[in-house]
Amino acid sequence: MQSINLTHHFLIAMPAMADPNFARTLIYICEHNEQGALGVVINRRIELDFKTLFDQIKIPLESAELAEMSVHYGGPVQMDRGFVLHQPCGDWSSSLKVTDGIALTTSRDILEAVGRGEEPHRLFMTLGYAGWDAGQLEHELVQNAWLTVPADSRLIFDEPVETRFAAAMAMLGIDFASLSDVAGHA
């Protein structure tokens, strides 16, 4: 198979996606290379807000606005670990720079800064991530499990969570209801 790089792309789950971890999900791919891929689901809330999370990890949270923000399901891998997708990239202990403007950070220092009201102010927090071994995502693409589209940061940080999936489909000019759950191959 030809080598592709889907870093900074969205994966849109096709209707036939049977895995409940990924049915009707929109995933932002943070890294894709010959070793595999890593992404976070960006359209599935969990029953946890920032205030509760920050209380649990014993970090003060000064912002009442942030206290009500939702934490999200990022994927089935390492669901006990937080992943912060954010703008600007900044200089954190453990970050993966996705683009010149977006990074994924897993270190406590970013949460401490957010708790104090410092940057980054555009952020999206998940517990867990989605991961693929070498060639696994490419195989799933051949099996028609996913649609792909170049990512738009406005969809990640500005679009309401409830409408992100439809907004990503609209980027392709497709209505999800019109898709078949049966794949065809020429």
Image (spheres, helix red, strand yellow):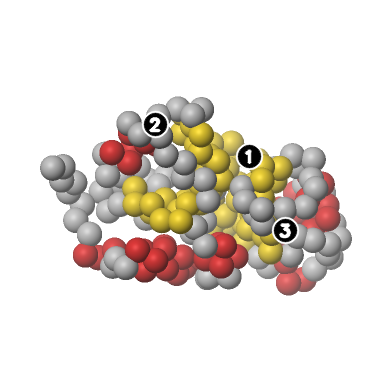
Q: CA distance from mark 2 to mark 3?
A: 31 Å
Residue identified by numbered label 3:
88
What's the residue type where badge 2 is placed? Gln
Select label 3 or label 1 by which is in front.
3
Where is residue 81? Give x, y as percent. Answer: 65, 40
Label located before the other in sequence (2 or 3):
3
Q: Secondary structure at mark 2?
A: helix
In the drawing, does residue 40 fall left or right of residue 26?
right
Query: Any mark on residue 80, and which?
Result: 1
**What residue is shown with label 2?**
136
Mark 2 or mark 1, which has the lower sequence index?
1
Q: Residue at x 57, y 55 (%)?
A: 72
Secondary structure under tag 3 reads loop
Residue that appears at 77% across and 71% down: 64
**Quadrant of the image occupied by residue 175:** bottom left
Q: Is residue 131 above or below residue 56?
A: above
Q: Quadrant of the C terminus?
A: top left
Q: Is residue 44 above or below residue 35?
A: below
Q: Which is more foreground, mark 2 or mark 3?
A: 3
Q: Earlier in the sequence, mark 3 or mark 1?
A: 1
Q: Residue at x 72, y 53 (%)?
A: 89
Q: Amino acid at mark 3?
A: Pro
